[in-house]
Image: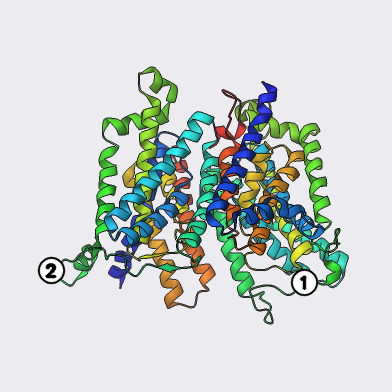
């Protein structure tokens, strides 16, 4: 049975590729060219390859953020807001310091706490008033996406910029590039390290044990003497903080400033990344890479041949529809099922 | 002024209300369909496209209903036959459709932006030529055919929950295994709730696109999510769902007015429906909790 369990993600990936090939044939004037660039493009040179790795970085962080919330049995749907707003606040705070090291530290600390704040408010509402956390996190997240837009367009807009964006950070503040012509930066290694760190915490620490118990059975956890409310609050705040860190690392590593709409759905795709990896932290950087591969394939195809880049959304949607489907097993325990 | 505000609130509440009622059917069987936003968006596109091609708004509406039923049914079958998490499938459908409509509009119509359909047939509008020009007159007049259908659908949902089918849905939602032991065919009940959800979401989508005769990929603009909020807060009662949707419609209208008539930054005005809904939901939640604890009667 175990070998069949591994086949399920393979079916998902095969169907996703099949569907993308079919739709590409339909929408593209030159299907063969397009298919080639879509599937092989990201590996064709160092620049494209590095950019693909770089675009998986935000997904690693939002994926980990979703995973942290899942691991205590709650859903965090506000990742988009935490990612976007956290990064903006962090960037604005960092602009006030001239010293590179301090500036970098301030950016990370401020955005992490902003993200934690955004996610802990709905968590608090859930704990105190039993307010549905799906709605709470989503609404608060969306409100702060709009607030972020306002901040970028109003108070913190760089008057000299053609689009809504803050001033540029100093070059010295930005993260070091690893693969020169591309925009791959140290944040990628940090993300992978975080994957393993969270894995070991989850597996071997007391906290991890409490998380697992609460996820498995909240009532048992309570009888067992675990403060369930506290665990939920910690899980949510940690989740928000990780999402916001992802945002600010994207700013520090790639853009160098906060630009309006730079998140474009990373929060929601992060949920997919976490589920595709079966909520297993060490696999998240691989699933993020797969989703980023689809994205950059579509981007390269649209650059080389005239194909709408929205094809990536379509394929990612198919992957999301199929990730939790079981093609060879009758049933299995699934933690997230109890909530949805 | 206030009457006009109310009148336009009703118009903007109707799409939200129909979608919310659709979602509340699926909630009744205990499987809330998150794909409302995507289903509405697909219906928007299909309705205007077909109405333009076949030169009939009725056929456009029909095509929208059929396509969203199919979408809704596939969400259910992925959940039922492949044990997929229904929440994740819904999220996937939303992402999938947001990509699909852009692909379709750029290949079929050659544009990704706002597409105007000039030749689309006008919807008949019910004009009451009453001599009264006071409040009631403005409030009940000038509804187009689709809005009338939507009002009918709202009333219908109130009847549906009282039919055997509606009661069965509630029974399945309350306890699936007991319902099964009582001899109900759980699958049939669940399928019909999803089909109803598809019909209502299809109507909601056409309600957005057909009267304007245009299509943009961001057309639904979070209305599906607002509808889900209304469905969750309204619970099993269609009247409750409709009530919450009216508040949402008012908030959406208020946000339009704020953008047009005041200096409030547009980004903040966009957030107004969200903020207002969150506050209403929270108050409701706190009040029910307080009542359960016996703080007041």
Quadrant housing residue A332? top right
**Drawn side of residue B42 relative to residue B142, left or right:** right
Is A272 on the left-hand or right-hand side of B259? Answer: right
User: Label 1 is found on which chain of the structure?
Assistant: A
Q: Nearer the viewer, residue B283 or B67?
A: B67
Up-down relation of residue A149 to residue A82 (above or below) = below
Residue on which disc 2 sits: B130
Front-most of residues A48 and A22? A22
Q: Position of residue A165 (x, y in %)?
A: 67, 72
Which residue is farthest bottom?
A160
Q: Quadrant of residue B248?
A: bottom left
Q: Residue at x 39, y 26 (%)?
A: B186
Vertically, is B31 above or below A108?
A: above
Tell me, yes or no, if residue B296 can be seen here: no
Q: Residue at x 33, y 56 (%)?
A: B14
Q: Chain of mark 2?
A: B
Above or below, comparing residue A151 to residue B169 in the picture: below
As helix, strand or loop, the secondary structure at mark 1 comes to loop
Please tell me whether mark 2 sits on a helix, a strand or a loop: loop
| Quadrant placement of the N terminus of chain A | top right
Q: Callout 1: few (<14), some (14-19), or many (20+) C-alpha neighbours within 10 Å?
A: some
Say which residue appears at 50% left-offset and 51% top-offset: B97
Residue B290 image offset from top left, x and y in percent: 46, 43
**Quadrant housing residue B249:** bottom left
- Cα–Cα span, label 2 and label 1: 64 Å
Q: Return the x and y of residue A331 as percentages of the image width and height.
A: 57, 24
Q: Residue at x 27, y 35 (%)?
A: B162
Image coords of residue A40 (percent x, y): 72, 51
List the residue tagged with mark 1: A95
């Amino acid at each position: 049975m175990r070998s069949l369990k591994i086949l399920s993600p393979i079916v998902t990936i095969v169907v996703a590729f099949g569907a993308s090939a079919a739709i590409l044939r339909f929408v593209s004037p030159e299907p063969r060219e397009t298919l080639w660039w879509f599937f092989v493009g990201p590996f064709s040179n160092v620049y494209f390859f590095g950019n693909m790795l770089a675009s998986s970085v935000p997904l690693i962080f939002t994926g980990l953020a979703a995973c942290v919330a899942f691991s205590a049995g709650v859903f965090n749907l506000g990742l988009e807001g935490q990612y976007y707003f956290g990064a903006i606040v962090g960037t604005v705070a960092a602009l006030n310091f001239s010293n590179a090291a301090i500036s970098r530290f301030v950016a990370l600390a401020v955005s992490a706490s902003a993200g934690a704040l955004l996610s802990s408010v709905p968590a608090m509402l859930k704990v105190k008033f039993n307010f549905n956390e799906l709605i709470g996190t989503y609404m608060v997240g969306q409100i702060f996406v709009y607030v972020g837009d306002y901040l970028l367009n109003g108070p913190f807009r760089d008057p000299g910029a053609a689009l809504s964006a803050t001033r540029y950070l100093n070059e010295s503040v930005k993260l070091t590039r690893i693969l020169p012509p591309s925009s791959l930066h140290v944040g990628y290694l940090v993300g992978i390290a975080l994957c393993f760190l969270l894995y070991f915490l989850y597996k071997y620490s007391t906290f991890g044990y409490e998380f697992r118990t609460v996820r498995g059975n909240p009532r048992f956890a309570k009888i067992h003497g675990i403060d369930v409310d506290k665990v939920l609050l910690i899980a949510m705040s940690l989740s928000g903080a990780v999402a916001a860190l992802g945002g600010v690392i994207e700013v520090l590593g790639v853009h160098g400033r906060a630009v309006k709409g730079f998140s474009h759905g990373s929060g929601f795709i992060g949920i997919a990344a976490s589920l595709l990896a079966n909520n297993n932290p060490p696999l998240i950087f691989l699933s993020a890479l797969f989703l980023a591969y689809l994205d950059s394939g579509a981007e390269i195809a649209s650059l080389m041949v005239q194909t709408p880049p929205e094809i990536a959304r379509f394929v990612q949607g198919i992957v999301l529809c199929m990730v939790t489907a079981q093609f060879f097993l009758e049933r299995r325990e699934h933690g997230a099922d109890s909530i949805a | 002024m206030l009457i006009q505000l109310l009148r336009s609130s009703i118009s903007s509440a109707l799409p939200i209300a129909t979608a919310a009622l659709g979602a509340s059917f699926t909630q009744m069987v205990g499987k809330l369909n998150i794909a409302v936003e995507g289903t509405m968006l697909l219906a928007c596109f299909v309705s205007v496209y077909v109405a333009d091609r076949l030169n009939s708004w009725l056929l456009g509406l029909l095509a929208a209903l059929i396509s969203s039923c199919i979408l809704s049914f596939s969400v259910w079958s992925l959940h039922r036959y492949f044990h997929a998490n229904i929440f994740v499938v819904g999220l996937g459908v939303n992402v999938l459709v947001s990509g699909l409509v852009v692909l379709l509009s750029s290949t079929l119509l050659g544009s990704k932006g706002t597409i105007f359909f000039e030749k689309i047939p006008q919807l008949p509008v019910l004009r009451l030529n009453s001599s009264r020009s006071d409040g009631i007159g403005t409030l009940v007049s000038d509804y187009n055919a689709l809005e009338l259908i939507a009002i009918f659908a709202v009333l219908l949902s109130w009847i549906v929950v009282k039919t055997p089918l509606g009661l069965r849905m509630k029974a399945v939602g309350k306890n699936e295994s007991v319902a099964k032991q009582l001899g109900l065919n759980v699958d049939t009940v669940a399928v019909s709730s999803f089909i109803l959800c598809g019909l209502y979401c299809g109507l909601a989508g056409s309600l957005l696109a057909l009267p304007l005769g245009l299509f943009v990929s961001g057309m639904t603009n979070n209305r599906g999510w607002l509808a889900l909020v209304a469905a969750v807060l309204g619970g099993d009662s269609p009247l409750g769902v409709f009530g919450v949707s009216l508040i949402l419609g008012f908030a959406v209208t208020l946000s339009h007015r704020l953008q047009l008539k005041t200096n409030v930054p547009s980004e903040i005005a966009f957030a107004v429906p969200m903020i207002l809904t969150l506050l209403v939901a929270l108050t409701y939640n706190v009040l029910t909790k307080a009542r359960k604890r016996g703080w007041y009667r």
